[in-house]
Image (spheres, coloured by chain):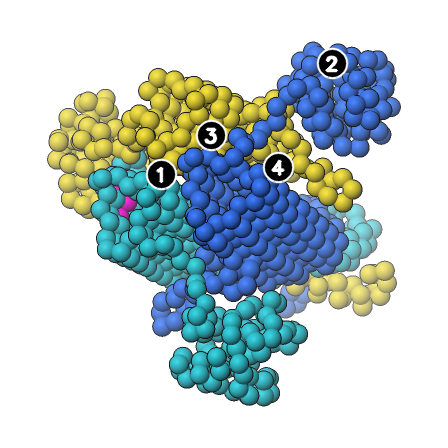
Chain colours: A blue, B cyan, C yellow
Amino acid sequence: MKLSEIAQTLGLERLGMDADVSRVAPLEQARSGDLSFVNDSKWLNKPNAASAWVVRKQLASNLLDRPCLVSDHPALDAARAGLLLGMTPFGMDPGIHPQAIIHPGARLGARVSIGAGACIGDGCLIGDDCLIHAGAVIHRGTVMGARCVVQANAVIGADGFGYEFVQGRHIKIPHFGTVTIGDDVEIGACTTIDRARFGATTIGDGTKIDNLVQIAHNCQIGKNCIIVGQVGISGSCHIKDFAVLAGQVGVVPHVTIGQGARIAASTGVAEDVPDGATWSGWWGQNHRDNKIQIVMMRKLPELLKKIRAIIDREEVRSPDVSK
Amino acid sequence: MKLSEIAQTLGLERLGMDADVSRVAPLEQARSGDLSFVNDSKWLNKPNAASAWVVRKQLASNLLDRPCLVSDHPALDAARAGLLLGMTPFGMDPGIHPQAIIHPGARLGARVSIGAGACIGDGCLIGDDCLIHAGAVIHRGTVMGARCVVQANAVIGADGFGYEFVQGRHIKIPHFGTVTIGDDVEIGACTTIDRARFGATTIGDGTKIDNLVQIAHNCQIGKNCIIVGQVGISGSCHIKDFAVLAGQVGVVPHVTIGQGARIAASTGVAEDVPDGATWSGWWGQNHRDNKIQIVMMRKLPELLKKIRAIIDREEVRSPDVSK
Amino acid sequence: MKLSEIAQTLGLERLGMDADVSRVAPLEQARSGDLSFVNDSKWLNKPNAASAWVVRKQLASNLLDRPCLVSDHPALDAARAGLLLGMTPFGMDPGIHPQAIIHPGARLGARVSIGAGACIGDGCLIGDDCLIHAGAVIHRGTVMGARCVVQANAVIGADGFGYEFVQGRHIKIPHFGTVTIGDDVEIGACTTIDRARFGATTIGDGTKIDNLVQIAHNCQIGKNCIIVGQVGISGSCHIKDFAVLAGQVGVVPHVTIGQGARIAASTGVAEDVPDGATWSGWWGQNHRDNKIQIVMMRKLPELLKKIRAIIDREEVRSPDVSK
């Protein structure tokens, strides 16, 4: 297919020469005849064998007359080009797999697909066009909106982890609550979302949750949040709309993370985060402060040599200095 | 139901006016007619629409004549009230699901329930009243006491991660051991507990393990421990009775964590922890020391400005200071 | 069985007296009649009831005339002795379990075993002698070499976590790619390996991956790597041959970890790691530097007392010092 045809169909600006492409491939694996894509200037000049590239506007000027499409969202438009080129994206066989296990008390919307070995419990409501992959377990009473995707072996609605210590033993607190999930939510493979003690653990519309994430009982996750792999959110946290939690972030119980806040990878959040803030650190804080402190810590050994020299001389001058 | 009736049935002191309640709900989701509960003074004056509250003794005096029940364990007594009010806690359908996969060589105690798609291997012994949720895999030879709960998609008894590097390759060490679990143990969704190389990986009576936890081969976990979500415990560790490991804690191999020790969230434990100690830190240490160092680190930039000024002047006074 | 017979069959040197052993057991659980093994001098003199030990050469001299076998790989040779003694290592029933769910479009090699509830998708190629444990989900198009082991409830080939933010919403990027796995790879329980957007996520020959690991879309993992439990590797990373990532390591997107590099437990890797380097730290860096800085940080409170005394006196001498 001609690059110029793809440009026209997708409504993208084309620069440089035209080219024939038959496939979309990542930069490192691209061969002649492939269309690839570049998100960042640092990959722009990496040698690669692709025949054409989807690039951001600001990078296009560096490409001279090499064949390219200009896009604000190179990966997404590369995928759209893949569809035009007849490539088949990953999906699942439509419909209910004969080996899915669906409780007669569950209600499924139109065009719901459910994979082999997936379990849907009593009283679940699954919205239209949801995809529930193989082995996922949706426990009783879970409510899910339209167009959600649940990846394989995820578990929604297990008991929360709640005990009271009474007379030398941990006594389980029964969980009466459920899980309520909005529209267009995605839930990663082996991710676990616990039911509430009372009321509901809630996930807002458009929120995307990666693999191996733990969301504990009674969390309220807002709309359009991004929660990356292996994040752990403790009980009764409130994550507001558009917050982004990078991989392996941990959040202690009863914390609020503000609207649009961004939490760097592996950050431990032990207190409320303001709207729009960027936080990082083992003991999370403002990212700028954290970065300065880390830089200083790295200069510490050098600096301390000098300080010790001063202390040594001070102790000669005034021997009581350390008292 | 009258609050006064609930008080009488549960044997709790009632303060303030009487009230009618029909449901238990968390503070943020409570409506008129709901009984809610408060664990901490910081939520006491949060506006909420509940009609009555279960509170700790020391908070009760702040409630003036609002209807409340006094409890040492508000969440637990709120749950007991929920049972009185006819609410149904999460559980599982009793008995063996027809799509559970149970090896004929496994032996199950009385009143064991096993969910759809769960697998019980050859030679497993499952004690009375255990609940094994959907998709859980209990590999051959696992021994489990009475009243245990295994949440969905947990894996017990997979091969430990043990290799020897011989002539440029990693050679797998066969695992001959098993997993032995006491009474009243709970194991979270997608949690993995590996079998021992020889002997048994053991989990003591009353220990509660949250979701997505990794317990490696040959660990000896004591009684009544609390192991929160996403904790990782390396091979051959010994966690003594009543230890508490908060979320995302990591423990290197062959470490002993003392009786009743408390490890803060995301702490890395790289050496033995004494009985009763509280530890924290990326490189775990005594929590008090760790906290002081973190506070100091946050003051470092300010302090270093002053130090630099001194060094600069010192270098004028004695130019050899840094040598 | 006589220790001398085991020594002869395994080709190991025997020291001290001969002994009768009937079983292999870990040091803490060993009884009379057991053969145990010791990897490290610190366990050498731990009291234990074993009748004989497999030890490293350099430890043997401390054992006086106690019965022992000398080995470069004590755990591995203890396991070989276990086989001689008739012990049965963990494995799985050979063949395809009747409740495995295999798409007619999947192709399986010779002597492949697949556990109950495991799902193999359309177009998968599974090499000879692979073992796929119960509940594992291998999505469509996955290619796997010979002698691989996939532990229970692992998920291979789920959609990568890729979205573009367009007009206030996260739009899913379709994933056209697959997962390609070499020979002799092991994949732990509840581990997730995502398919590529385009091309393939690849795992090299001989690489061993522990439980609950996340490997994101388009990662290229080399040969003979060791990736320990709960590691998270973000999209498009390149992990070169023989790299070792200890437990809970996190790696940001588009990073290269060099050949033979060793990353300490819980390290956050935010930039490229050179070949052969050892790194550690919340914000990962050279391990030696990180260790020095941590030691200094621990001495900081003491040192700062002295510094404050100097600053105080300096401020008397020259009151403008802090300006």
Magenta-drawn segment = B139-143
Magenta stretch encompasses residue C84: no
- Mark 1 crowd level (few <14, some 14–19, many ≥20, 10 Å Cα): many
Labels 4 and 2 share a subunit: no
Which quadrant of the figure contains the C terminus of chain A?
bottom right
In the drawing, what numbered circle is on residue C161? 4
- Which residue has dot 2 on it? A1
Element on which disc 4 rests? loop
Q: Label 1: chain?
A: B
- Which residue has dot 1 on it? B158
Find residue B242 and report its horizontal and vertical position in percent.
38, 62
Give the distance between the C-alpha atoms of the residues marked 4 and 2, in whole angstroms. 29 Å
Residue kind at label 1, given as amino acid type? Ala
Q: Residue sitting at 28 percent across and 41 percent down?
A: B102
Q: Residue sitting at 30 percent across and 31 percent down?
A: C91
Q: Give the mark toward the camera: 4 or 2.
A: 2
Q: In the rendered view, would you say B44 is above or below B277?
A: below
The quadrant in which residue B76 appears is bottom left
In the drawing, what numbered circle is on residue B238? none
In the drawing, what numbered circle is on residue C138? 3
